[in-house]
Structure formats: structure tokens, C-alpha cells
Image: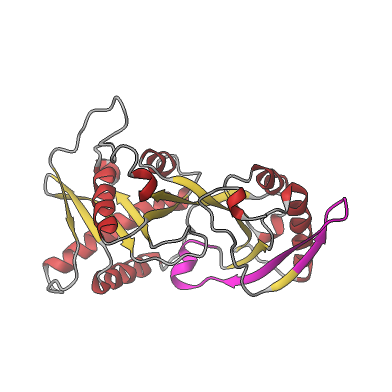
């Protein structure tokens, strides 16, 4: 069985990577296999993940609910020989449309923590363009200016002031992400966010800022091209972060930023764009669906790792 039987946008197969092979049997005697990889997160990646994560990747897409349950039980037994601390997790990334596997994951204490959602430009071309806003809601984008943030700017004075404001905006969005479980609270977050922002500007990563009546109100930072083994064939770009100041939400600033990113990235030759969002985030989950994104993969986690059932 191929992943495309579950979802036509999925690749035929996904390389499970290197790691420890885990074997299990279902109640009817069918053998299933997965790869378990222990990941240590430090620095930037630790802002989004627990320090130590055991990632389980089933080898075959056709394992079904019984196969997933058997592998999760085997992983729990494997962890008896480890010493997971409180800053740890077990993780499984699996097709969002496989509801049988989702039931097994939930029954073993796993919760959906993040979703990889895609917007395929080829498919979208057959439909309407990006909407200005949801049906029935008036356009409130007047007075909003979206412009690129480009490298090569004089690194003193005004540039540093812009960076300071952009970092503050990103950190405000991050505090909300921490509150809903999409990010992890870390003391070094401000320094790491500033370093990443300066790196992105210096590298010329696609980036836009929005101003409302001359005041900074939004940021969109993208990665192009962005490699991903779980994506359909073709070249894809990632909308890495879209942040809107809390007091400026509801004016269409996020949509204006994303529309600017779509236009530029697709002009460069991207087949489409993708995002990671938290299903627990009541703002982003609705926002991305309205703009044509739909779930492809869901990452399920149990935190800490000892919480698996």
C-alpha cells in the first residue's frame, strides 16, 4: 500500500530514516515495523520541541489501527529501559486523513500537537483567488502597507530599530504559541529569535512587514526553497512564521501578508506553499484553512514521554 491511497497529495513513500528497528505483532499475528529515533533538541529547535524526543516512524503506510496500537505499545515497553525526564516526548507524524491510526494514537495518550498543511497552487489555480476576507466580513485593509524586508540595509540606526520591533512582534506571537502548547518556554528565546531574524535578513530569506497607519503591525517570514521528504513532488516554499500584533488583528493584515508571500513565491516557481500550525491554536487553524491550506500530516505527541499509555 502507498501513502497516496490515504491521501492523493502524499508522496508514494517516506524514508523512515536511520534508527532502531522496532518490531511488533497485532492481535491477529501480523508483524509491523517502525524506526525509532532519539532526537536531542538544543538552541533554536528547542524553542518548538521538548529537549528529548523519541520519534516513531512506521515503515508501512498500511498498518491500520491495530498495527499502530501494537507499535505504540512496543515503544512504551522500550522506554522502560530509558530515563525520560519531564522535558521529553514521544512523537509520531502520520497522514492527517488516516482516521483509524488517529484513534489508536488518541487511545494511547497521544495528542495532535502540530499539523503540516499545504496549499497546492496548481489546484488553487482552478478556483478563486485569495479572498480579501471571510464571506460577510467587510474589507478593513485600508491604511495597511505591506513591503519586503530586504538585506543589504545599513546595519545601524533605523535598521536596528526595525529589527528590535520585529523581534518584539515575533516574541508576542511566540508567547501565544507557548500558551496553547505549540512552543516551549525557554529563557534564551529572545536572543535566539533575534539571531534567527538577523540571519534571515542577511541571507535574503523572503520576508514582508506590514504597517497600519505607519505603525508596525505584522511580519511574514518564509523559507525558499524548502526541502521536505513528506511533501508532494515539486518545489515548495514554507511560510515559517506569520505574526500580527494583538491590537491589530481582525483587519486583514495576516491575509495581506500571506497574499504578498504567495504572489512572490509562486512567481519564483514554487508549486505551492506549506505551513506548520497548532490545532490547539484557535486563531491559526481557522486562518490557514480559509486561505486554501489543508492538513497533510499531523504530528502526535505525548509529553512527557512517560505519559504514554
The answer to whether residue 300 is seen in the rendering is no
- Taking the magenta stretch, the answer to whether it contains residue 45 is yes
Q: Residue at x 53, y 54 (%)?
A: 10
Magenta span contains residue 237: no
Q: Nearer the viewer, residue 296 or 270?
A: 270
User: Colour scheme in the image?
Assistant: secondary structure
The image quadrant of residue 170 is: bottom left
Say whether residue 147 is left or right of residue 262. left
- The residue under the point 43% across, 66% down is 187
| Residue 216 rendering spot, x and y as whole percentages | 19, 52
The magenta span reads 22-49
Q: Is residue 169 above or below residue 102?
A: below
Q: What is the x, y in percent for residue 65?
A: 73, 47
Identify whether 284 is placed above or below 38.
above
Say if residue 228 shows up in the picture: yes
Q: On the rendered structure, is 259 left or right of 295?
A: left
Nearer to the camera, 198 or 25 = 25
Residue farthest to the top, as pictured: 136
Which one is in front, 55 or 46?
A: 55
Location of the N terminus by quadrant is bottom right
**Residue 268 location, x and y as percent?**
27, 62
Along the horizontal axis of the image, is 174 left or right of 165? right
Q: How many marks?
A: 0
Q: Residue at x 28, y 34 (%)?
A: 133
Residue 61, image x, y percentages:
66, 56
Residue 35 location, quadrant: bottom right
In the depicted structure, whether residue 273 falls above or below residue 188: above
Q: Is residue 23 left or right of residue 17?
A: right
Which sits in the foreground, 16 or 79? 16
Amino acid at each position: 500500500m502507498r501513502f497516496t491511497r490515504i491521501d492523493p497529495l502524499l508522496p508514494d513513500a517516506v524514508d523512515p530514516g536511520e534508527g532502531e528497528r522496532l518490531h511488533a505483532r497485532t492481535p491477529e499475528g501480523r508483524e509491523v515495523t517502525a524506526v525509532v529515533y532519539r532526537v536531542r533538541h538544543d538552541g533554536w529547535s528547542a524553542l518548538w520541541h521538548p529537549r528529548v524526543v523519541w520519534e516513531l516512524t512506521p515503515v508501512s503506510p498500511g498498518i491500520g489501527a491495530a498495527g499502530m496500537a501494537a507499535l505504540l505499545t512496543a515503544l512504551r515497553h522500550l522506554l522502560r529501559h530509558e530515563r525520560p525526564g519531564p522535558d521529553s516526548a514521544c512523537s509520531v507524524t502520520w497522514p492527517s486523513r488516516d482516521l483509524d491510526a488517529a484513534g489508536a494514537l488518541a487511545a494511547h495518550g497521544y495528542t495532535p500537537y502540530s499539523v503540516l498543511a499545504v496549499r497546492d497552487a496548481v489546484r488553487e489555480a482552478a478556483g478563486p483567488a485569495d479572498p480579501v476576507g471571510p464571506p460577510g466580513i467587510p474589507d478593513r485593509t485600508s491604511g495597511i502597507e505591506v513591503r519586503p524586508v530586504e538585506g543589504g540595509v545599513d546595519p545601524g540606526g533605523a535598521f536596528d530599530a526595525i529589527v528590535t520591533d520585529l523581534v518584539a512582534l515575533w516574541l508576542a506571537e511566540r508567547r501565544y504559541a507557548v500558551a496553547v502548547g505549540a512552543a516551549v518556554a525557554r529563557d534564551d528565546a529572545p536572543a535566539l529569535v533575534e539571531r534567527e531574524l538577523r540571519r534571515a535578513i542577511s541571507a535574503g530569506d523572503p520576508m514582508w512587514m506590514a504597517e497600519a497607519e505607519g505603525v508596525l503591525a505584522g511580519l511574514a517570514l518564509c523559507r525558499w526553497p524548502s526541502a521536505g521528504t513528506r511533501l508532494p513532488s515539486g518545489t515548495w516554499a514554507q511560510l515559517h512564521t506569520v505574526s500580527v500584533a494583538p491590537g491589530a488583528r481582525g483587519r486583514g493584515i495576516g491575509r495581506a501578508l500571506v497574499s504578498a508571500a504567495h504572489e512572490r513565491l509562486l512567481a519564483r516557481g514554487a508549486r505551492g506553499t506549506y505551513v506548520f500550525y497548532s490545532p490547539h491554536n484557535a486563531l491559526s487553524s481557522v486562518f490557514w484553512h480559509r486561505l486554501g491550506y489543508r492538513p497533510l500530516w499531523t504530528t502526535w505527541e505525548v509529553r512527557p514521554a512517560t505519559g504514554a499509555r
